[in-house]
């Protein structure tokens, strides 16, 4: 299951990534928008939106960004959805599985070199992997939620 920008789970079983069409439909329904209303707001035809949601038509980067923007999805989540949508399936599965996502020493050193709050998060799930001291001061206790707390 993929977490949406709303913090809710987008349906999908453990072995498959929700399609970009399922993600679009989830967000459209969350905001209780009909396809007709979304078509009016985006300028994309209702038939095209329906085909994208059903996976019968590929979603272009431009249409994806237009629809997600119209649905009020923050740019960072739009970028992440686009990254997942346009990755080869094997990469999508790896990103969503969360395997081998523990930060390496150079990742932690990179965090520590920043003079502002910073954290590493797992793609798609948003799980906290590591934080720097600035982040810990800004959000006390966050380090305890990281998958592999630093010493």
Image (spheres, rainbow, N blue to C red):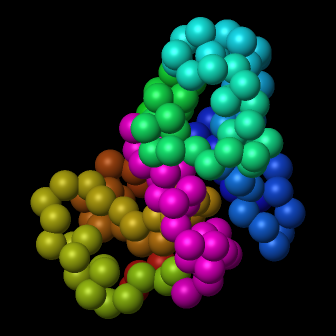
Dividing the image into 4 quarters, which one contains the C terminus? bottom left
Q: Is residue 95 visible?
A: no
* Residue 47 image position (x, y, % from top left): 72, 25
Looking at the picture, tell me which residue is in the foreground, 10 or 58. 58
103 lies left or right of 53 = left
Which residue: 50% across, 35% down? 63
Give the image quarter of residue 105: bottom left
Give the image quarter of residue 110: bottom left
* Residue 103 image position (x, y, % from top left): 42, 82
Looking at the picture, tell me which residue is in the foreground, 38 or 11. 38
Looking at the picture, tell me which residue is in the foreground, 65 or 104. 65
Q: Is residue 82 above or below residue 93?
A: above
* Magenta-colored stretch includes residue 5: no
Please identify the dominant SS of the magenta region.
helix
Which residue: 56% across, 72% down? 88
* Residue 102 image position (x, y, % from top left): 49, 83
* Residue 32 image position (x, y, % from top left): 76, 16
Q: Is residue 131 visible?
A: yes
Q: Is residue 107 above or below residue 70?
A: below
Dividing the image into 4 quarters, which one contains the N terminus? bottom right
Q: Is residue 112 above or below residue 72?
A: below
Q: Is residue 105 above or below residue 148?
A: below
Looking at the picture, tell me which residue is in the foreground, 9 or 53. 53
Q: Residue furthest bottom?
A: 105
Which residue: 42% across, 71% down? 130
Task: Write down the region rendered in magenta.
Answer: 75-100
Q: Residue furthest right?
A: 13
Which residue: 52% across, 67% down? 87
Counting labels gives 0
* Magenta-colored stretch includes residue 80: yes
62 lies left or right of 34 = left
């Amino acid at each position: 299951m993929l977490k949406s920008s709303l913090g809710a789970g987008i349906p999908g079983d453990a072995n498959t990534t929700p399609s970009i069409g399922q993600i679009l439909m989830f967000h459209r329904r969350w905001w209780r928008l009909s396809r007709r209303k979304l078509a009016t707001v985006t300028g994309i035809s209702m038939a095209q939106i329906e085909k994208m949601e059903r996976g019968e038509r590929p979603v272009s980067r431009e249409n994806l960004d237009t629809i997600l923007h119209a649905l009020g999805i923050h740019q960072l989540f739009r970028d992440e959805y686009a990254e997942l949508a346009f990755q080869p399936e094997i990469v999508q599965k790896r990103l969503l599985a969360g395997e081998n996502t523990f930060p390496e020493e150079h990742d932690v050193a990179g965090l520590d070199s920043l003079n502002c709050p910073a954290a590493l998060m797992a793609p798609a799930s948003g799980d906290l992997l590591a934080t720097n001291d600035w982040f810990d001061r800004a959000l006390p206790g966050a380090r305890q939620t990281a998958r592999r707390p630093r010493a």
